Amino acid sequence: MGGSGDASEAQGGGDGAQMSGGDGSSQPVEADAGASDEAGESIQAGDAAADRAIIRNGRMVIEVENYSTTADAIAARARTTGGYVSDSNRELHRDGNETWYTGYIVVRVPSEEYEPTQSMVSKQGTVRSEETTTNDVTDKLVDLEARLTNLRERRDRLRTFYEQANSTEELLRIEEELSSVQSDIERLEAQKRSLEQRVAYSTLRVEIREPAPEPSAQQVPYHERSLVAAFLSSATDVYVFTRGLLVTAASLAPWLVALAVPVVGGRRLLRNRSLPLLGRRGGSESGTEGGGNGSDDPQRESTAAPDTESPDDQT
C-alpha cells in the first residue's frame, strides 16, 4: 500500500517535472495554467464589453470663478476631440451692485473621450454633483439589422417578381408592396443610424455656476449701522437725488423752450388784435359822455343838484 502510494507520487512528480520543463515541481505549472485561463477569460470579457453598443449620458454640476472662461474651455475641449456643442444657456443674476452667472453647456464627444472630458471638466472648479447613465442597445441594433436583412431580401424578391409580371394588375400590386417594403427599410435604417450616432457620441451636460455674493453690509439692521456709514449713505442719496433733478431739468429744458415759443407768440398775437378793439370802444364811450352834458339828460340834471346850506351856515 505504502509502496504503491510512493510510486504514484513519484509518477505524478515525474509528470509534473515533464510539463514544467524538468524542474521537479508541479504546483507552479498548475498556477500558471489557472492564471492563463483567467487572463483568457478577462480578454474575452473585455472584447465582449467592447463589442457592446452602449449609450452614455452624463451630468455634472461645478462651481467656478468665471463662467465664460470655463464654458469656452469645455467647448474647445469638445471640438478638439472631434465633438461639438449641442446646446448652451447662460443667465445673469444681479443683487445690488453684485452680478454673477449660471447656466449650462451640453457637449457631444466620441465615446472613448467621455471619461477624459469628465476629468477635464472636474479640474475647472469644484464639482458639486456628478452622474452618468448608460443604456445598452446592443440587442436593439441586432434586431434592427436582422429585420433590415429580411426586408432587403424581400425587396429583392419583389423586384424579381416585378420584372416577371405579365399583367398590369400584377405590376401595380407588386409595385405597391415594393413601395411599402422600401418605406419600412428606410424607417429602420433611420432608427439604426440614430442609435449608432448616440453610441458613437456620448452626451455630457455641464451645469456651471458662479458663486453668489456674500451678504452685504446693507443687510445689517438699520440701528446697528455705523454713524460714518449712515452719513455717507445719506450724502450719497442727496447727491443722487440732486443729480437726478439736474438731469431731469436738462432733459426737459428743450421741451419747455419748444412749448414756450408758440404760447408766447399766441399771447402777443391776441394782445395785438385786442388793442384796436379797445381803442374803438374808448372813442365811442367818450362821444356818448360829451353828448350827455346837455339839459336833455334828466339824470345828469338830477345828479348836479344845487348845494344846500348846512345847519352851521344857517346858524
Image (cartoon, rainbow, N blue to C red):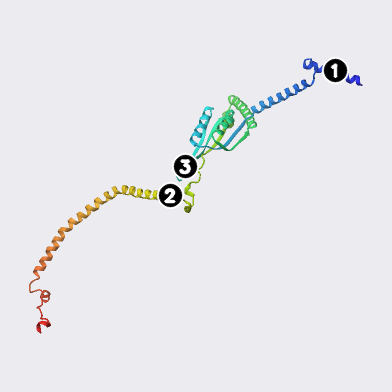
Q: Residue furthest left?
A: 294
Counting from the top left corner in percent of width and height, residue 67 is at 50, 37
Q: Secondary structure at mark 2?
A: helix
Disc 3 crowd rating (10 Å Cα; few below 14, some 14-19, many 20+) is few
Q: Secondary structure at mark 3?
A: strand
Q: Is residue 42 visible?
A: yes
- Residue at (88, 19) in percent of width and height: 6
Q: Give amino acid for label 1.
A: Gln
Q: Give amino acid for label 3.
A: Thr
Q: Quadrant of residue 305?
A: bottom left
Asked whether 138 or 233 is in front, the reply is: 233
Which residue is under mark 1?
A: 11
Asked whether 295 or 195 is in front, the reply is: 295
Counting from the top left corner in percent of width and height, residue 89 is at 50, 38
Which residue is under mark 2?
A: 228
Asked whether 170 or 242 is in front, the reply is: 242
Q: CA distance from mark 1 to mark 2?
A: 103 Å
Q: Earlier in the sequence, mark 1 or mark 3?
A: 1
Disc 2 crowd rating (10 Å Cα; few below 14, some 14-19, many 20+) is few
